[in-house]
Image: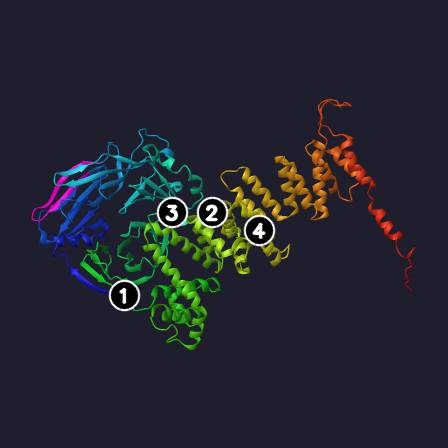
Amino acid sequence: MKLRQVSDLSDFSRGHWLRELLCRREELSRVQSSPDGQHLLLLQKSRPPALPRVLAFQRHSIAGADLERSWQPPQPAPVGLLFLQSPAAPGSWVLAVVWEHGRAEVWHFVVAVGWQLLQTLELCQGARARVVSVCSQGASLVWCEERPPLGAHSDMSKCAFRFCVCARALEVGEQGVRLGTLRIVLHNSPEYQVLASPQHVFLVPAAAGFATTSKFLLIWHPEKAEFIITAPSAGFIHSKVLHSSSESDFRKLLLGSVGLLSGFAPLDIHTSTVSNSGGLLLVSTKGSVSMVEQDGTQRHIFDLEGGPLAQGSPVQLKTFGSILACVLAGALYLIDQNSGRLVEKEVLSMKEVHVLESQGEEDSIQLLSQTGIYSFSFSKPEDSSRPEPCLVEMVFEEACRYYQRRSLSSSKLTVEKLKKGGTFQAPVVLAAILQHSLHQKQKPAQGLQDTYAKLLSTVSLELQSYMSLELLKACVVCAPESEVESYCKELVEQEVSRILQSDMDKDNLAYLNSVFASFPKAAWKAIRSCLQLQQNGDGLLVARATPEVWKKVLCQPQLEEVGQNGMVPLFELICASFLRFKPKWLPSFVELTQQYVSSSWSYSSKEGPEGRVPLYKRALGVLARKNKHGEADDEMELELLLCSKRPKAVLQALHLLIRLKQWQRVVEVAEKFSKLSPLLNKEIFITLLAEFAGHRELDPYLDRLWPLCPAELTASDILTTVLQHLPHSQEDPVPFSSEGNQLTVGLLKPLLQRVVQRPSVQDEMYSDALQSTTFPPPTPPREH
């Protein structure tokens, strides 16, 4: 990095005064530069005897009248200094100073003349309105204003939603400035900070807002009249198109999401700004820098050093091409936004600096200090001499996390220690392999040690897979919209396959949850491919997945790792995909999974997945989470219960069929599952005998029901069960009832005859003894 002074501030009008103001940094609340870099604007706070004011300084080469606007408290202060493009001439601009009470002054600078006030405008319609945040989006001004309630003692819970977000077109032409009609984007809302990108407006909750409304961001797309509700850290994204002005109420916007949003943690935001790519840059109080894209997704970029950030400690963010410049505590960080790699870090000798807008240069940064303007030149990541620096750094960072999890030491392992320590050779070897195989055009093994060359031949297929994956990601980024879907399908399949070959830890499981939520159809096809699910010639579902893949599917994390953020295990994700795209296959899939479990773990093993919650119950849990429950879901519940072949599940399915009065299926299930065990046979028969005693629905099936009678049941047992389940009548019983729904001895006669004529267990035992070849049996030998 090279430091070069480009100005000592003497080339600015009133340069000595500018230098004095920069020395009194505690009086400055904002420093901005004009789009052409020829003007500096300072917002000075009130410190008696001086008044608060807006000051503009320009270079001597464009001399003219100065701009200085001051105001006397309690007069409202300015809330925004906005540079707006003017269509009068290419590259020209105007300055809009927006005041707290809704007044906007539009200024224009004319060379050799100076600053001229074009027009004064009133943005707000109500006299009591107060602007708290403002930005410019395209040719419009967007702001958040407070509308205080009329009553002095209004309910505070209602007062929290006394803000609204408004927009008005502001056209600057040769004839002057024209203000469009007021448009209320969102009303009855909490306080928001509005930040504009070229196509979207980000609504960031104010720091003093309520905890319930500070758990999510809003992204407004003016052209589509669409709002995106996103809780980035929780992976929640929901979009809603507002078809009429009546739908722009804040409560109506959140109506379908408030239950889910209430379980999320409040956003951790210390600093926020918009990048030149249109994303929202966020810095948390822990020093984590992330990017919220315009579709609501979040991407982590970098973790700043120094621990938690104090509320008053300033953090400046500015993007220059793909480089993010961050100034914190006297240090300048240059970070590659694409890879998250720290390009350079420079400790600044200047106490207070302000990052200025670049003038079309993406390889230098201008910093304003009390001694002048300095330019820092740096090499872009693509020009680095290190082969594949991003990938090599990723290897060491992943190795740090891996060894740190398995280390008993409390000291933190860093990339620098890993490179210099010499204790862990695996990341060093892998980095050397990558440097010689991915970047250079020569033969992969050239220049490597013999041991490294052998390892390269082992991981060559993995390297090829990685390169094809990176190429596919590049195609997704550059592809037209019509081809993105096909690329995404292939990308999701490769990602799901990669995760199933890795350790199923908490991070990978959370990543799979986001993939299934964002690309449900592609994820369904990917999981079918990974498990090799297909129907054979008999129409039965078969899977040819390896045992390692089955173990990943059946992996069930601890309860504390799921639930709070909506993350579910992989087995439940797959079951949900079956229910959505191929519900008829779900029972067969659960049965296939149980077959693998029975062949890999013992029935009562606590280590296997069946040792915690049976698989059929996990699948039933997914079915229960459906929003609507219909007849098809009852049928699916039956199939899942029966496919488990567990006694309790079979009896539960039998009771469900009885409740649905499907008597034909009741008998079929009884005939099929009575053969599994004598105990289950007895439970099924007693259940059906009790039903038989209560009504006459089973009478047509008695010839199929009686053969199911267990051998140990006697006539006395049967009569006792029947008498216990006879329906209670309110009238006195009569010998001959006119109603045909009463139980008669004639209906029981075939069963009783069958039981009485059947030889008892004791008779069979004695008959076996009588038919013995030696009777009586020989005397046992005496013990002497």
Q: For the residue marked with disc 2, what is the amino acid?
A: Gly
Drawn side of residue 234 relative to residue 752, left or right: left
The residue beneath circle 4 is 540
The percent position of residue 423, horizontal first and vertical second, equals 44, 71
Check disc 2 and report the residue beneath it.
566
Residue 32: horizontal and vertical position, in percent? 20, 50
Q: What is the chief secondary structure element of the magenta stretch?
A: strand
What amino acid type should be assigned to the residue bearing mark 1?
A: Asp
In front here: 248 or 44? 248
Query: Mark 4 to mark 2: distance in Å?
Result: 33 Å
| Sooner in the amino-acid sequence: mark 1 or mark 3 | 3
Cα distance, mark 1 to mark 3?
A: 37 Å
Alpha carbon of mark 3 to alpha carbon of mark 2: how far? 17 Å
392 above or below 117?
A: below
* Nearest to the observer: residue 597 or residue 162: 597
Which region of the structure is painted magenta? 104-122
**CA separation in Å, label 1 and label 4:** 57 Å
Residue 167 seen from this side: yes
User: So how many labels did they put on this image?
Assistant: 4
Identify which residue, 571 or 613, lies in the foreground. 571
Q: Quadrant of residue 672?
A: top right
Judge the density around disc 2: few (<14), some (14-19), many (≥20) Cα neighbours within 10 Å.
some
Q: Amino acid at mark 3?
A: Leu
Res 383 label: 1
Q: Earlier in the sequence, mark 3 or mark 4?
A: 3
User: Is residue 2 left or right of 494 when viewed as pictured?
Assistant: left
State the residue position of label 3.
267
Give the amino acid at mark 4.
Answer: Leu
Q: Residues within 10 Å of mark 1 (few under 14, many from 20)?
A: few
